[in-house]
Image: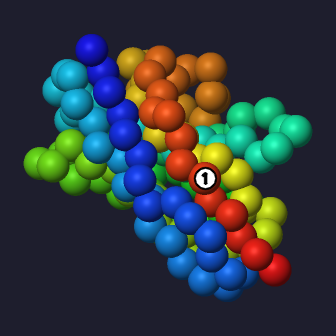
């Protein structure tokens, strides 16, 4: 079965950086698009970034564009989210997810999810 395990979350000051990592296993990683989504307290889960199976195409939600970068290493079955110049509003649980339907900004298109990693940004 597909397993996704996130790491790299933590407490960071506004303006700082974090790199989230996600280790995938269970099926051929290079066949599937991947995404990062987040959920803040009291809010719905929202799309952050996605990357195609080959890594050639990436999408970032406007609020993180220019600050966050999604990438992947198909040889290592890893996907990353580099977070720079973080803001307090980036505070959330961040989830790595995999979709069967190609790169997507729709959280409902993601079939498999990790357990999440907490990111807390202090002002």
Whether residue 115 is visible: yes
**Residue furthest out toward the right:** 42
Residue at the image position 44 percent from the left and 22 percent from the top:
112
- Taking 2 as reference, is 117 above or below it? below
Tell which of 117 and 74 is nearer to you. 117
Tell which of 67 and 12 is nearer to you. 12
- Judge from the rendering whether residue 109 lies leftward or rightward of residue 89; answer left or right: left
Residue at the image position 36 percent from the left and 47 percent from the top:
22
Residue 13 percent coordinates (x, y): 68, 81
Tell which of 75 and 11 is nearer to you. 11
Residue at the image position 88 percent from the left and 39 percent from the top:
42
- Taking 86 as reference, is 40 above or below it? above
What quarter of the picture does the C terminus occupy?
bottom right
- What residue does disc 1 label? 118
Residue 79 percent coordinates (x, y): 34, 50
Would you identify the image quadrant in which residue 24 lies? top left
Whether residue 67 is visible: no
What quarter of the picture does the N terminus occupy?
top left
**Residue furthest out toward the left:** 75
- Judge from the rendering whether residue 21 lies leftward or rightward of residue 26; answer left or right: right
Residue at the image position 21 percent from the left and 43 percent from the top:
77
Classed neighbour count for the residue bearing mark 1: other residues with Cα under 10 Å, few (<14), some (14–19), many (≥20): some
- Judge from the rendering whether residue 47 lies leftward or rightward of residue 78; answer left or right: right
**Residue furthest out toward the front:** 11
- Taking 110 as reference, is 81 above or below it? below
- Judge from the rendering whether residue 11 lies leftward or rightward of residue 21; answer left or right: right
């Amino acid at each position: 079965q597909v397993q996704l395990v996130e790491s790299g979350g933590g407490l960071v000051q506004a303006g700082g950086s974090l790199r989230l990592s996600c280790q995938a296993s269970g099926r051929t990683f290079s066949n599937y698009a991947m995404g990062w989504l987040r959920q803040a307290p009291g809010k719905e889960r929202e799309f952050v970034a996605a990357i195609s199976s080959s890594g050639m195409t990436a999408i970032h939600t406007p609020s993180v564009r220019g600050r966050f970068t999604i990438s992947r290493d198909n040889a290592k079955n890893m996907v990353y989210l580099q977070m720079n110049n973080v803001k307090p509003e980036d505070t959330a649980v961040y989830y790595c997810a995999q979709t069967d339907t190609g790169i997507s900004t729709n959280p409902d298109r993601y079939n498999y999810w990790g357990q999440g990693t907490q990111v807390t940004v202090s002002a």
